[in-house]
Image: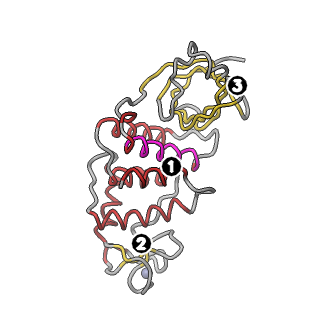
Amino acid sequence: MQSIELDAVVLGVMDYGEADKIVTLFALEQGKLKGLARNAKKSRKRFGGALEPFARLRLQVTLKDGLSTLNGADVINVFPHIRTELGKISHAAYACELVEQLVAEGETNTRLFRLLTAYLEHLDRVPQDASDRRFFEANLLKVLGYQPELARCACCDGELAAMQQLRLAPSGTGILCGSCARTGRPVSSDTISLLIRSLSTGRFGLVRFPPEGLAEAGAILDAAIACHLTRPLKSLAFMEQVSC
Ligand SMILES: [Zn+2]
């Protein structure tokens, strides 16, 4: 079978048997896929130590149903500055685990690939930041079609921009106006505006949430993400631990 080249980010790596590794990838041309890297544990000749979490690689792959075969790898970017700081590692691992969990195998998503690689490049350049994490999550939900409704009340469809006393819907999937909800977590219109801005600027580092806005945006985004998770994120506890 023919070997093709893929531009891919390593989402996860696990040892397989004595010598092999199974690598989960998100590729620009192919979406999410799993590949078997034979002898990757013992011989560094073909993979040169490139099969590391969140590395961006040019891979030679023989595509197969289920488990593809990885024939070789060239490093595009290992994001060296991320690897020297636990806080950055935890944010990169979290972003990769989110993509791994929320994306089905074989679904190409160019915008998601660009979002993930832009986040890794940003993390490599500057310290990790809670606003950037929320910016990534908001845009991740958008490019996957899971974006929470931010412009209209989830109950009466009224325009939220004109309303006061907004609250997070108990289901976690939207915002309610003051007439539709008397209980639930309050959310300020400033936070909604910053989230809407996050979805329109397209560049990391431009949107900064104040502390209360971070907590509110976090409640909205965590609830929206939780709707689509099938198991808890292993990287979340690690990220919260090292971010304190
Ligand atoms: Zn309403």
x, y percent for residue 180? 44, 84
Q: Which residue is mark 3?
A: 18
Q: Give the alpha-carbon distance from disc 3 to disc 1, as whole Å.
A: 26 Å
Inspect the image, locate mark 2, and give the three-letter code of the amino acid beneath it: Arg
Residue at the disc numbered 1: 235
- Dot 2 or dot 3: first in sequence order is 3
User: Which residue range is magenta in the image?
Assistant: 88-101
Do the CB atoms of the residues marked 2 and 3 lie less than 8 Å apart? no
Q: Is residue 50 above or below residue 94?
A: above
Residue at point 49%, 79% (across, down): 155
Which one is in front, 108 or 17?
A: 17
Point out the tag, 1 or 2, that comes first from the N-terminus.
2
Is the CB atom of the residue marked by disc 2 within 8 angstroms of ligand 1's nearest atom? no
Amino acid of disc 3? Glu
User: Tag 3: Cα neighbours inside 10 Å, few (<14), some, or many (≥20)?
Assistant: few
Q: Nearer the viewer, mark 2 or mark 3?
A: 3
Please name the residue that numbered disc 2 is placed on.
152
